[in-house]
Amino acid sequence: MAHHERIDPSGTALIAYDVCRRALAPADPARRAAMRPVLDAWVRLIASARSAGVPVIYTTPVSRADGADVARAIESDPMVTRLGDAIDAALFAVGPPPVSVFTLSSFQWRLRERYPDRLRYATRTLTTARVAHFRSLDLPAPLSFLYPILRLGHDFIALPVWQALRPRRP
């Protein structure tokens, strides 16, 4: 019996690469007829993704205005090479579950090359309240701006103090 893997829609996106009219509906009638099954398959796939709540991201290849080979330019960028190596190493790695989006990660840090973007990433990651924070203290709507402060106080003051002072089990 074949094993079918289930895809979690909450952590998935459909990337539609070069799915454009010129590629899927060429001017040549014979080529257009040959591409019809491919076009129909894309229509079904995109409709299924949308009905499952999966975001659809459209992208197409681009070239620089001076005609330089973009792939060569990307490959020569050391940051892109390091990120690509990190993705290759972790993509099918068996091990602990991925780090929560509410935890700073060196990979996410390196994705942002400019320091203002890195600072924004760190600030948002450390101050975004989670469900547990909303459940622990139900603030009225006009005071909801206090949740980031609540998260900082809970995660970086109250929780470490509680963990340090709680009795250890033998």
Image: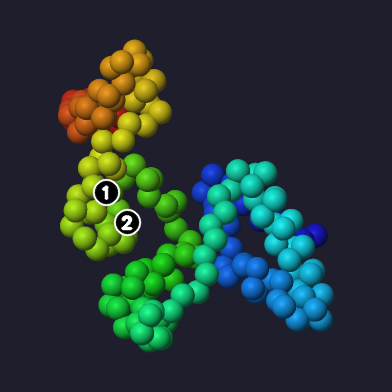
Residue at image x 22%, y 42%? 123
Q: Quadrant of the C terminus?
A: top left
Q: Nearer the viewer, residue 163 or 170?
A: 163
Query: Looking at the picture, how far across and down is residue 59, in whole percent?
Result: 52, 65
Q: Which mark is residue 121?
A: 1
**Position of 67 compared to 112: left or right?**
right
Amino acid at dot 1: Tyr
**Quadrant in which the N terminus is drawn:** bottom right
* Residue at position x 58%, y 57% in the image: 14
Q: Are marks 2 and 1 in contact (CB under 8 Å)?
A: yes
Towards the viewer: 43 or 120: 43
Q: Is residue 54 above or below residue 110?
A: above
* In the image, farthest residue toward the front: 27
Q: Is residue 19 above or below residue 133?
A: below
12 and 91: which one is in front? 12
Foreground disc of the pair 2, 1: 1
In which image quadrant can residue 30 be found? Answer: bottom right
Q: Height in image: 45 above or below 130? A: below
Give the residue drawn at x 26%, y 30%.
Answer: 148
Q: Amino acid at mark 2?
A: Gln
Instruction: Tell me the quarter of the picture where residue 117 sits.
Output: bottom left
Q: Is residue 29 in view? A: yes
What label sits on residue 108 in the rendered view? Answer: 2
Residue at the (37%, 45%) spot, across then down:
101
66 vs 19, left or right, is left
Local crowd at mark 2 within 10 Å, few (<14), some, or many (≥20)?
some
| Residue furthest top in the image | 140
